[in-house]
């Protein structure tokens, strides 16, 4: 069944379709799209795609996802029979197709509240002054700090001693490799207390792997980059958090950690005047 705007959208797309077919800018096949997802400008899914498949698509692809028309329209326009998911690589033609679909963007809204298990298991990235302060606050709020990340063996030894002091003598494992640490201690939350230049890649990694994330400072205040870059990076993180339905917040005080333990985020990484929706930029870290 046609929806409002479909006929106009189809008319615009029919003009672009021959050029899209000749250029090969459009690709199909979920496995192929997953292999090339870092190169995709956006993904177009049809309205006859199942709800479960749509949810999986939103999780799997970091680019914008649009939902419009039907699989029969894809067949008519591009000759892809029985296809409900099409990926478009970056290029001028893709920009044209994206403009035709702009009103059909699938919205992504980061979670601000959810039920979290008790006691909440937390891994802290960084055992410096900020990481130790957060470890104490997590403990006082009723969470369980289960592991920490440091850059080298000397940092692990030093951090281990200091963490034990903060945690009333309880020793916790540390590691220099983030993915190995997360697999080892299996937390629910990653608290990023690293140097500010490492905030983005650490938050991106943790969200991509499916963890809730609390960052030491508001992401846009990271030193050494412009406000525009900070906003784009924060936008990418919020989109990633929304796709995985994970909490993403920043800690400006003790109350932030207490609220996180209760499953609430009241202070987003991105300021209210900057919408998290829209076209997410290409992340500057490997997908």
Image: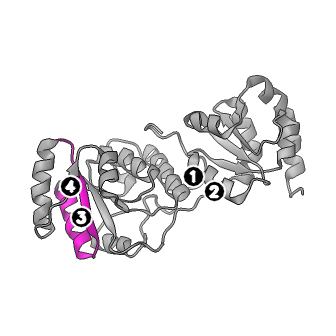
Residue 148 image point, x, y percent: 23, 55
Q: CA distance from mark 1 to mark 2?
A: 6 Å
Q: Which residues are magenta?
A: 129-152
Q: Secondary structure at mark 4?
A: loop
Label 4: few (<14), some (14–19) or many (≥20) C-alpha neighbours in 10 Å: some
The residue singled out by tag 4 in the image is 173
Q: Which mark is residue 134?
A: 3
Tag in front: 3 or 4: 4
The residue singled out by tag 1 in the image is 59
Labels 2 & 3 near each other (Cβ < 8 A): no
Residue 36 image point, x, y percent: 59, 33
Tag in front: 4 or 1: 4
Rendered view: 212 above or below 205: below
Q: Earlier in the sequence, mark 4 or mark 1?
A: 1
Q: Which mark is residue 219?
A: none
The residue singled out by tag 2 in the image is 55
Labels 1 & 2 near each other (Cβ < 8 A): yes
Q: Residue at x 14, y 66 (%)?
A: 170
Q: Is residue 274 visible?
A: no
Tag in front: 1 or 3: 1
Residue 211 image point, x, y percent: 41, 57
Q: CA distance from mark 2 to mark 4?
A: 35 Å
């Amino acid at each position: 069944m046609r929806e409002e705007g479909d006929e106009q959208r189809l008319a615009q797309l029919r003009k672009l379709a021959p050029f899209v077919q000749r250029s090969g800018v459009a690709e199909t096949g979920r496995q192929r799209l997953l292999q090339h997802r870092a190169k995709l400008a956006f993904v177009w899914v049809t309205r006859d795609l199942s709800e479960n498949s749509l949810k999986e698509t939103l999780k799997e692809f970091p680019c914008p996802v649009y939902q419009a028309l039907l699989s029969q329209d894809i067949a008519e326009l591009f000759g892809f029979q029985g296809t409900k998911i099409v990926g478009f690589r970056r290029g001028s033609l893709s920009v044209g197709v994206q403009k035709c679909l702009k009103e059909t963007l699938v919205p992504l809204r980061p979670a601000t509240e959810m039920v979290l298990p008790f006691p909440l298991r937390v891994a802290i990235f960084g055992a410096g002054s900020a990481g130790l302060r957060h470890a104490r606050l997590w403990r006082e709020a009723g969470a369980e700090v289960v592991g920490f990340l440091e850059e080298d063996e000397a940092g692990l030894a030093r951090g281990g001693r200091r963490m034990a002091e903060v945690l009333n003598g309880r020793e916790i494992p540390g590691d220099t490799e983030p993915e190995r640490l997360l697999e080892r201690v299996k937390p629910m939350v990653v608290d990023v207390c690293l140097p500010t230049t490492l905030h983005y890649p650490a938050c991106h990694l943790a969200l991509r792997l499916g963890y809730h994330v609390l960052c030491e400072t508001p992401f846009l205040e990271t030193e050494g980059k412009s406000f525009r870059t900070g906003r784009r990076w924060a936008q990418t993180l919020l989109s990633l958090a929304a796709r995985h339905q994970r909490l993403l917040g920043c800690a400006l005080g003790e109350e932030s950690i207490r609220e996180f333990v209760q499953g609430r985020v009241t202070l987003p990484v991105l300021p209210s005047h900057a919408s998290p929706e829209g076209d997410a930029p290409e992340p500057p870290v490997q997908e």
